[in-house]
Image: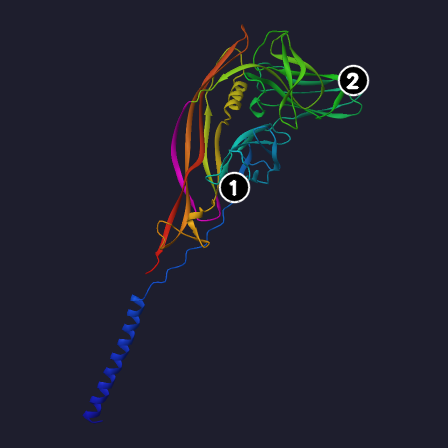
Amino acid sequence: MNKKQKKLISLFSSFIVIVFGILFFSSCESSRVGPDVPPPNPPAPPPQPIVLTGFVRDISNLSGIPGATVKILKADNSIVTTLLTDNSGKFSYDVTNITDNTLSVMGTKDGYGQSTKIAEINKALNIAAVSDIILTKLVVVSAPVTPAAGGQATTTNTQSVSTTPVSVTVPPNAVPQNITLTVAAVPAAQLPKPPTANTSVQSAVQLGPSGVTFLQPVTVVFPLPNKKAAGSTLSVIRLNPTTNIWENRNITATVDASGTAASAQLTSFSANAVQDNLSITIPTGTTSTVKLADVELTSGSVEKTYNYSNSITISTTGTVDSGWLLGEVKSRANVDVGNFTQLLKFNFPPLLEEYKRDGKQYNPSFPNQSGYWKFVWTVNKATTSQNWTASGGVAPNAFTGSGTITKETVSASAGAWVWVKTHDQGG
């Protein structure tokens, strides 16, 4: 190959390299400076229903109680619905269409006491919340009863100043057939409050079989939590199993010679109690609040669990059982003592109409921006400290009590819509 041919080949090779370089550079420049194509705004997510979710738990270990009955009631005690807890003790109910801001939620199960909590419904935040319903397992004692011999069952009442047990004595000829008699003492905090202000449940028993009518009066002995005058009388009240409201039975129980127990004659069974005067004062107290977290959603729902604790101190004067008085304070203040968890379910609320255009999410303040809306809740823990006082009884058997309630509550507040920018439309 001569020099001229070599020169031509070299020039041709250089030309080819230059052409490919130009094409590659042009391709890169076109990619770099071409107009951006913004991603479309996502469709407006559907609002989620407001679902009230909670647990019924055993006070002994805070395990969930499966198969517990949960009644949700309005302020007039009309029943919204009745539910059963699942295997974890959990229950849920859609309250989207409920107009009330608060509901009562009562939990109970055979062999346990009962407890009621207040559920808060916040339509603005699209959430509803209720504290765990804490139940105490009862010690149920049973005994056979026959028409010829009758029968008797006894059990201990730990909230008493008496060594006398709870006892139920069925005389002969009181039942037409054999039955199994059951009796259990029920703690004061595991019962509804009496209907009359400044009164208390002194001693309560769950008697069975419920609904049985006796042909002869049955004697029930109620151990008392504070000493009373021998021969004085106390009103007997009955818990209506349908309305869950105490009813006056127009029956009295007579205090025995020791002043620490009272007996009554009954002809039918259910939850029965004796009541007496008790004054408990719980001022508003002071509250401090700390922020726990922010929770945000762009759609759907999410559940979060938070820890809280409550405590009550107590000191007494006079002859009174401190456990019973503590239970009365817990009932009045609607406080369970111990360490607990609060479940909050956050439900994405309806997107505001001004935040939608053609079914897509839209920010009227920045109409050319691509993006989406998220809803943000602030979760707070409030700690309230209250001093309480109580007094009851008649001299020389008067008593007093006092102490401090420290109550924590976890709630969501300060919900806000926040725009998340993804792109400026128009390049």
Q: Quadrant of residue 308?
A: top left
State whether residue 291 is above or below residue 372: above
* Image coords of residue 330 (percent x, y): 51, 23
The reply to whether residue 68 is visible in this rendering is no
- Judge from the rendering whether residue 81 lies leftward or rightward of residue 36; answer left or right: right
State whether residue 283 is above or below residue 122: above
Between 274 and 225, the one lying in front of the other is 274
Magenta region: which residues? Answer: 285-302
Q: Which residue is located at x 45 percent, y 34 percent?
A: 410
Between 262 and 116, the one lying in front of the other is 116
- Judge from the rendering whether residue 181 lies leftward or rightward of residue 98; answer left or right: right
Between 215 and 295, the one lying in front of the other is 295
Any magenta on residue 299? Answer: yes
The reply to whether residue 383 is visible in this rendering is yes
Q: Please tell me how crowded label 1 is: few (under 14), some (14-19), or many (20+) other residues with Cα within 10 Å.
A: many
Q: Which residue is located at x 28 percent, y 78 percent?
A: 20
User: Which numbered disc covers residue 172?
Assistant: 2
Q: Quadrant of the C terminus?
A: bottom left
- Judge from the rendering whether residue 427 lies leftward or rightward of residue 58; answer left or right: left
Any magenta on residue 284? Answer: no
State whether residue 13 is above or below residue 208: below
Query: What is the secondary structure assignment of the residue under circle 1?
Result: loop
Please name the residue that numbered disc 1 is placed on: 50
Characterize the magenta stretch by its predominant secondary structure. Answer: strand
Q: How is the image coloured?
A: rainbow
